[in-house]
Image (spheres, rainbow, N blue to C red):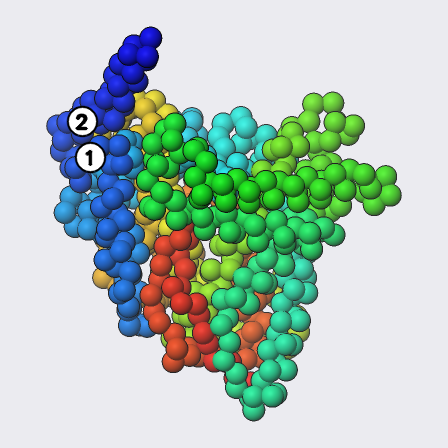
């Protein structure tokens, strides 16, 4: 009996980790698609880890925006060796790298379900939440129908007020420090943007429960860090059947996940208990509860578990994108003082010293172009992935079901064939005629993805960024601190390795 079970397990392992990957590698080679050689069980993970370690000490000049050799350096190496379309291996799974924007468009404009989302593994889902970012098909349509009202025009108009209420106290605090510092003070501004983004998303998603929700966010952020570390440091996480062993790392992740779940359950139960006196609320949680609570509708579109997962997703995705966008935008303001002056003049012309309203924001054309160029050069989201939903053909290449389809956004955003020879240069005026005309292909801008599954919160992010930058430019000038080290790093998102220390001055 034991011998039979061992023989079956051995046969399964050989088929999954040896014969099948080798067969797929031969299939790709026969089609002219090359790539790094598959390694037993782990694929190319060990090489990826080695290349990351070699790049860890690199530092760039502050005027250099070509960070491909230090951030996800394996892609830079493999593109150089094999071209813009190659196959690598994440564990035993093949991953087709799509550096051709036409292929990217075909995948992301599909409406038939041929290319569903790829979520890597359960740990990744734990970190981001199984919300709209990761779900597909009818499930995604149900969630979208419920959540759409949160991003209505009227709601977005009110967002400017929410953001200014969150930013105002922080700006006043900076001004108080400036008075004590004789008109100049140095701060690590990325931490402040983290606080602002957390405050805003807490109010938008959880409203009157925003204080309790911040505790959930801190636990979820720690969970994300552990998950990223496990991808390259916990090799067991790549082996099915072993990735859920009670290792020290897994035990920490499970504890944090339980903590997040407990906080969110308490918030939801509190809303349900006070609905007769306080209602469900006008925030995102309230909108979902109003549409989905069984005593409100006969056939709820979302379950309570699904509501909780959406809260996790929007809290993490909505916060992280905005915080990092603001951080890199300030970096570019600091290194391009002429643009800082141009934007300040536009803000003073359209807003004066008043708190920016949604109407004022719509007139900030230069600010809009500046933010788009910041997103092109320093997109917070670095990689987006889909998978082949069945055996199919893509761009003349035959793919087997579940082949991962990888798009590294920086590869598209820095493609000189799309953006010109100045692709690595900071030039906001390239967006003068809107996003679809900024490059030689209308889908070359990928910061919010593209197609029918483009980020539902992109207007939300843009409004936040405009309000924060406008309120800073109205009162302060910014320059880089001599302590700043230009070394972007990859932690699922693009982050400055040593923070963003800047010098603020009164204008």
Q: Label 1 neighbourhood size at 10 Å, few (<14), some (14-19), many (20+)? A: many
Give the quarter of the image for residue 157. Answer: bottom right
Secondary element at tag 1: loop
Q: Give how far across and how far down residue 288 sits, in percent.
A: 68, 38
Q: Can residue 198 be seen here? A: yes
Residue 448: horizontal and vertical position, in percent?
45, 48
**Residue 395 position by quadrant:** top left
In the displayed structure, would residue 270 be above or below residue 174?
Answer: above
Can residue 338 be seen from the camera position used here?
Answer: no
Of 290 and 4, nearer the camera is 4
Q: Residue at 65%, 29% (x, y): give it.
A: 303
Which label is found at residue 38? 1
Extreme-top residue of the structure: 1
SS under mark 2: helix
Q: Is residue 40 above or below residue 473?
A: above
Whether label 1 touches label 2, CB < 8 Å: yes
Residue 479 in the image: above or below residue 227? below
Q: For the residue carrying disc 2, how many other residues have a C-alpha within 10 Å: few (<14), some (14-19), or many (20+)?
A: some
Tell me what residue is drawn at x 37 percent, y 25 percent.
Answer: 389
Task: Tell me what residue is drawn at x 28 percent, y 12 percent.
Answer: 3
Q: Is residue 363 left or right of residue 159?
A: left
Q: Residue at x 52, y 66 (%)?
A: 191
Closer to the camera in the image, 429 or 238: 238
Q: Position of residue 416 (x, y in %)?
A: 24, 56
What's the mark number on residue 452? none
Task: Please give the residue where the numbered disc 2 appears in the rendered image.
Answer: 22
């Amino acid at each position: 009996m034991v011998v039979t079970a061992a023989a079956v397990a051995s046969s399964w392992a050989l088929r999954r980790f040896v014969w099948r990957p080798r067969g797929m590698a031969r299939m790709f080679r026969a089609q002219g698609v090359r790539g790094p050689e598959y390694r037993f069980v782990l694929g190319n993970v060990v090489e990826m880890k080695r290349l990351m370690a070699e790049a860890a000490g690199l530092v760039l000049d502050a005027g250099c925006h070509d960070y491909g050799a230090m951030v996800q350096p394996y892609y830079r190496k493999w593109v150089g060796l094999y071209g813009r379309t190659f196959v690598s291996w994440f564990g035993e799974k093949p991953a087709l790298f799509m550096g051709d924007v036409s292929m990217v468009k075909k995948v992301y404009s599909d409406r038939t379900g041929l290319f569903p989302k790829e979520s890597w593994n359960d740990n990744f889902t734990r970190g981001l939440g199984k919300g709209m970012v990761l779900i597909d098909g009818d499930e995604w349509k149900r969630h979208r129908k419920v959540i759409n009202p949160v991003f209505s025009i009227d709601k977005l108009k009110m967002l400017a007020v929410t953001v200014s209420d969150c930013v105002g106290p922080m700006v006043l605090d900076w001004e108080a420090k400036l008075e004590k510092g004789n008109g100049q003070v140095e701060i690590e501004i990325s931490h402040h943007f983290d606080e602002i983004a957390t405050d805003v998303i807490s109010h938008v998603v959880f409203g009157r429960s925003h204080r309790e929700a911040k505790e959930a966010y801190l636990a979820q952020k720690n969970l994300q860090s552990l998950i990223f570390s496990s991808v390259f440091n916990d090799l067991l996480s790549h082996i099915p059947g072993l990735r859920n062993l009670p290792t020290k790392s897994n035990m920490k992740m499970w504890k944090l996940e339980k903590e997040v779940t407990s906080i969110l359950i308490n918030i939801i139960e509190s809303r349900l208990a006070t609905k007769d006196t306080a209602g469900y609320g006008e925030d995102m949680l309230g909108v979902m509860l109003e549409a989905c609570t069984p005593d409100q509708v006969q056939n709820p579109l979302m379950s309570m578990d699904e509501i909780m997962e959406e809260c996790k997703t929007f809290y993490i995705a909505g916060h992280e994108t905005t915080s990092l966008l603001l951080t890199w935008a300030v970096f570019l303001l600091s290194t391009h003082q002429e643009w800082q002056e141009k934007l300040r003049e536009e803000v003073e012309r359209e807003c004066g010293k008043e708190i920016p309203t949604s109407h004022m924001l719509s007139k900030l054309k230069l600010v809009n172009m500046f933010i788009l160029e910041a997103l092109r050069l320093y997109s917070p989201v670095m990689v987006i992935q889909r998978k082949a939903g069945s055996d199919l053909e893509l761009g003349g290449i035959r793919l087997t079901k579940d082949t991962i389809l990888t798009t590294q956004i920086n590869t598209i955003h820095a493609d000189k064939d799309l953006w010109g020879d100045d692709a690595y240069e900071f030039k906001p005026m390239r967006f003068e005629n809107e996003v679809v005309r900024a490059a030689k292909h209308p889908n070359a801008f990928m910061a919010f993805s593209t197609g029918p599954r483009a980020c539902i919160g992109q207007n939300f992010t843009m409004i936040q960024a405009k309000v924060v930058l406008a309120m800073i430019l109205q009162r302060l000038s910014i320059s880089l601190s001599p302590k700043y080290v230009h070394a972007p790093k990859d932690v699922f998102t693009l982050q400055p390795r040593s923070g963003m220390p800047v010098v603020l001055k009164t204008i």
